[in-house]
């Protein structure tokens, strides 16, 4: 919809649709996905090979499900030689950011003689899902694998669909090898999720599944979540830009297209106080779209889910932003940091003219696996916390326990737990 709309008309015509955009209706695919999962549980590798033939058009033998060392060596010959330097830069930045999230064991004295704290323990085995439909995503390999490495996950496996030639895209293979993935499997879709959730003779069962995917992958993750941990809802990409009269419409248009080219289901929003900015942005978009290799994706995304909204104030823009809860939020106003504390719901925030979304997508170090579809109201982006368990630790001296004895016994008696009270009182029984 390449036209300006007032905030009043947007709220009346589109707000409900936008707020509910993430409520994916799995009914249309859940039966088919459940059957796929059941088949994999019953038939294991045979089901994986059958589904790979059916859905990907690739015939594999069981001994070719896992990528071997020769395939990885060959992949290095097929990539641009500069790509290794690109991986190193991104990998270092991603590691630095996620290492800052790591916590050593800590304790605090809550009462005299009583200390409580937490220790961080990683999952033993994690499964990564990397999509391979519309394009290869080596950056997503880094975003999902590097924090797992920082968290000290002992084993990381990766599933991704094969190309028509039966191989994995070389950029994905190289990225996976560079970050130390233990095993890579040529399996995609719901069948890959089932394999990682329940295990087959070739693919080991994991404790957690991480990574984005299409509606079939997302439905499969929801179904298997009763048996294995999963991460956040990550659907079609989206960007929301807040701007004022100081903004650069050429930057805004470029940033909108950087997300619209992902797929036709992308949502793009511009909330601005300036009629001149929104008009100039739309003109620039009309000029740029025909030049894009993926102009069909961008055109359809903007026609279906492009909203150019004129607001009366930045405050009004922020209020609407918090209702929409975008995956990516760019704030391109005179002093973007001045409104940061007012943002309540966003997957990731980009401040100023020189922090566009692709900076976070590839190289800044923050994670690009983010909640979309409004899920930023409830979820955070992928982080080291997705790869660890936090275990509480309690220690106490006799004096410390004595100091809390009356409090504990009182609670136990009120709640009818006599043995709870006795476990405390026995320690101070003078008849012992």
Image (spheres, helix red, strand yellow):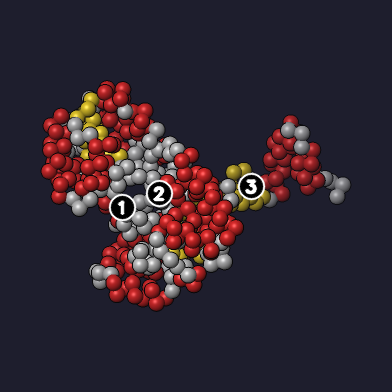
- Mark 2 is surrounded, within 10 Å at the Cα level, by few (under 14), some (14 to 19) or many (20 or more) other residues, namely some
Q: What whole-number distance in Å separates the C-alpha atoms at marks 3 and 2?
A: 49 Å
x and y, in percent, of residue 48 in the image = 50, 61
Q: Nearer the viewer, mark 1 or mark 2?
A: 2
> In the image shown, does 352 or 324 lie closer to the viewer?
324
Numbered mark located on residue 154 in the image: none
Labels in figure, total: 3
First reached walking from the N terminus: tag 1 or tag 3: 3
* Residue 197 visible in rendering: no
Q: Return the x and y of residue 283 as percentages of the image width and height.
A: 12, 38
Q: Residue at x 35, y 42 (%)?
A: 327
What residue appears at the point 27 percent right and 41 percent down from the top-left corner? Answer: 301
Q: Is 260 left or right of 59, judged from the image as shown?
A: left
Residue 214: image tag: 2
In the displayed structure, 355 sits above or below 332; it is below
Give the residue displayed 38% in from the left and 42% down from the top. Answer: 372
Q: Is residue 171 left or right of residue 121?
A: left
Residue 131 place in picture, x, y as percent? 38, 56
Q: Which secondary structure, mark 1?
A: helix
- The residue nearer to you, when weighing 206 against 55, is 55
Residue, far right: 431
Residue identifier under label 3: 114
Residue 58 in which image quadrant: bottom left
Residue under pointer 1: 361
Q: CA distance from mark 1 to mark 3?
A: 45 Å
Q: Disc 1 versus disc 2: distance between alpha carbons?
A: 19 Å
Q: Quadrant of the N terminus?
A: top left
């Amino acid at each position: 919809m390449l036209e300006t709309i007032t905030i009043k008309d947007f709220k009346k015509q589109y707000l409900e649709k936008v707020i509910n955009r993430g409520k994916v209706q799995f009914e249309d695919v859940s039966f088919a996905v459940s059957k796929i999962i059941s088949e994999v549980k019953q038939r294991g590798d045979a089901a994986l090979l059958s589904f790979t033939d059916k859905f990907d058009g690739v015939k594999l033998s069981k001994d070719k499900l896992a990528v071997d060392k020769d395939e990885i060596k060959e992949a290095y010959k097929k990539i641009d030689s500069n790509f290794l330097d690109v991986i190193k830069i991104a990998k270092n930045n991603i590691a630095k950011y996620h290492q800052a999230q790591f916590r050593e064991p800590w304790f605090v004295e809550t009462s005299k003689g009583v200390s409580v704290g937490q220790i961080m323990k990683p999952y033993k085995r994690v499964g990564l899902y990397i999509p391979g439909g519309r394009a290869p995503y080596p950056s997503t390999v880094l975003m999902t694998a590097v924090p797992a490495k920082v968290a000290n996950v002992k084993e990381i496996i990766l599933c991704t669909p094969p190309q028509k030639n039966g191989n994995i895209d070389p950029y994905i293979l190289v990225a996976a090898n560079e970050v130390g993935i233990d095993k890579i499997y040529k399996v995609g879709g719901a069948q890959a999720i089932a394999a990682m959730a329940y295990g087959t003779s070739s693919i080991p069962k994991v404790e957690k599944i991480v990574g984005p995917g299409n509606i079939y992958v997302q439905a499969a993750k929801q179904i298997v979540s009763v048996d294995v941990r999963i991460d956040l809802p990550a659907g079609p990409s989206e960007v929301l830009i807040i701007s004022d009269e100081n903004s650069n419409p050429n930057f805004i248009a470029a940033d909108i297209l950087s997300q619209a080219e992902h797929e036709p289901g992308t949502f793009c929003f511009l909330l601005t106080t300036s009629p001149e900015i929104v008009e100039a942005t739309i003109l620039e978009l009309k000029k740029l779209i025909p030049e894009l290799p993926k102009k069909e994706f961008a055109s359809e995304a903007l026609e279906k889910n492009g909203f150019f909204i004129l607001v009366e104030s930045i405050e009004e823009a922020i209020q609407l932003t918090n209702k929409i809860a975008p995956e990516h939020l760019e704030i391109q106003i005179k002093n973007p940091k001045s409104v940061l504390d007012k943002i309540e719901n966003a997957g990731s925030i980009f401040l100023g003219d020189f922090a566009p979304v692709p900076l976070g997508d590839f190289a800044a170090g923050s994670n690009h696996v983010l909640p979309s579809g409004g899920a930023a109201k409830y979820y955070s982006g992928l982080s080291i916390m997705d790869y660890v368990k936090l275990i509480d630790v309690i220690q106490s001296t006799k004096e410390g326990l004595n100091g809390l004895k009356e409090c504990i016994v009182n609670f136990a008696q009120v709640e009818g737990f006599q043995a709870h009270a006795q476990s405390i009182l026995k320690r101070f029984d003078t008849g012992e």
